[in-house]
Amino acid sequence: MRRSLSVPLAGLLLALIAAPALAQPPTTPVPGPRDPNQPPASAPNGPQPLAHAVGDAGTGLSVVRLGPQGVPTNTILPGLGEQLPKQSVTEFGLGLASAQVNTEAFLSTERVVTQANPFGFAVAGRSPQSPGTLVQTAIPDNPQPTNGGLPIPETPLAKLKLLNGSVHARWDEKVGPCVSPLATAKTSLAGLEVLSALPAEVPLPVKTSLISIPDAFEASSVVKLVDLPGSKNKAVESTSTMRAVSVELAGGIKIDVATPPTLTATATGDEKTSTITYTAPVLKVSQNGKELGTLDAAHPTIDIPLLLDLVVIKLQIAGLNEKKAAFTGTGFSGFQLGATARMLDVQVLPTDKLKLPNLPTALAQISLGEQIVRAAAPQGGVICGTSQPPQTNVPQQPGAPAAPPRGAPPLAYTNAAYNSIPLFWTGTALLLAGVVIFAALPARAPSSRAQGSTADRR
């Protein structure tokens, strides 16, 4: 047992050192004043876009999980970790593309964020930031996308031949996210080998790697605003798309992708019209030229024994998971929804037949085509327009600072008194006037008493 674990643990340690991981930057929270009576830290200048939209799409070419569902999820809330799904012992992702739109972000540079990451790494759900990432953010607007090659990581878990990325983030100063294209991120590779350095003790008839993708493999994530039927407003649409030709596995197994998957979340602000659309993949499976079956929505799983019944590879189309909920926020209220899916799961040595508690679902799990989409829109849809100057009769939200009375002078946005700036300039003007008056007065001769006193002292 110690000999069989020494090699994979050593490779895992090397991969952990050599490959830091992807961590999506969270949206900066809005800082609040220490004193609720203080003026706001900043205020918008001029007319602002009326559009409120939140959406993100993420797609990964491949994710390798060692010990899937083997580690409990830790949270700061007591008892919540028992309700959440367990994390993998280790995760390693390749070719990650993400597109995010959040009109409510406090920092203007976080309104639209697009990223193309070469790889990511996580241990028990914790992941550091990965280098070599292509990023575009808006504001300001980017008329052209950023394209380039991504650095290829050297790791025993996977090998890539050529990896490219493309990111594009847009924003209009007048109508905000009502621009096309809005947020797009893509990653593509020309060749992939997963688990190319398996230990010799593992009884798999593997010559080069467990999984090989000789042809082009592409992941695309897009967030945009689309027309809302029967309205001049827009809906938020987040789409994750995979493009693949074929996949080769150990033991002469070949998988031809007849229909690639597409996952889309469309938020209109209303639960009745908001939808999640999923085009399930259709995969043709064969072994050494003999057809084994078809993986599709009606037949999602195939078990293929490689060494009697001891070593089994399970092929599975990961089921679609959906989440929907209405929400009420400080910025706007509406409806949100999201979904996750995977094109193909390859499980090595699945443990479901052992009937033992607290075991990972498999020794290793390789997912091809990770997809996640989320979208949120206000009630009635996204308004593509520009706000008018603020009015005094606009109702205030609970807990918000009171609006200034009609005809009141504008307040200075400082941490001191509201009229500190006018007082400063008034004091400066009086000081300059005093200097001018003092300089203009004629010089006066000293008095006789002062002269006598001076002579007595001498």
Image (spheres, rainbow, N blue to C red):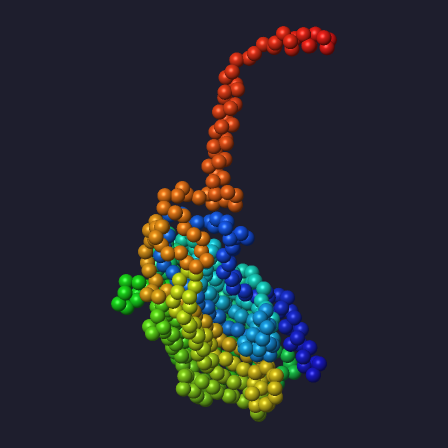
Q: Residue at x 33, y 72 (%)?
A: 273
* Residue 115 x/y as whole percent: 48, 62
Classify 125 as above or below 141. below
For residue 166, say whether it is visible: no
Q: Residue at x 48, y 29 (%)?
A: 429
In the rendered image, the quadrant that contains the N terminus is bottom right
From the viewer's perspective, is 208 left or right of 286?
right
Classify 170 as above or below 226. above
Q: Residue at x 41, y 83 (%)?
A: 296
For residue 30, say whether it is visible: yes
* Residue 436 x/y as whole percent: 50, 21
In the rendered image, the quadrant that contains the C terminus is top right
Where is residue 231, by image quadrant?
bottom left
Residue nearest the viewer, comparing 300 with 112? 112
* Residue 438 x/y as whole percent: 52, 19
Where is residue 245, by image quadrant?
bottom left
Label total for image: 0
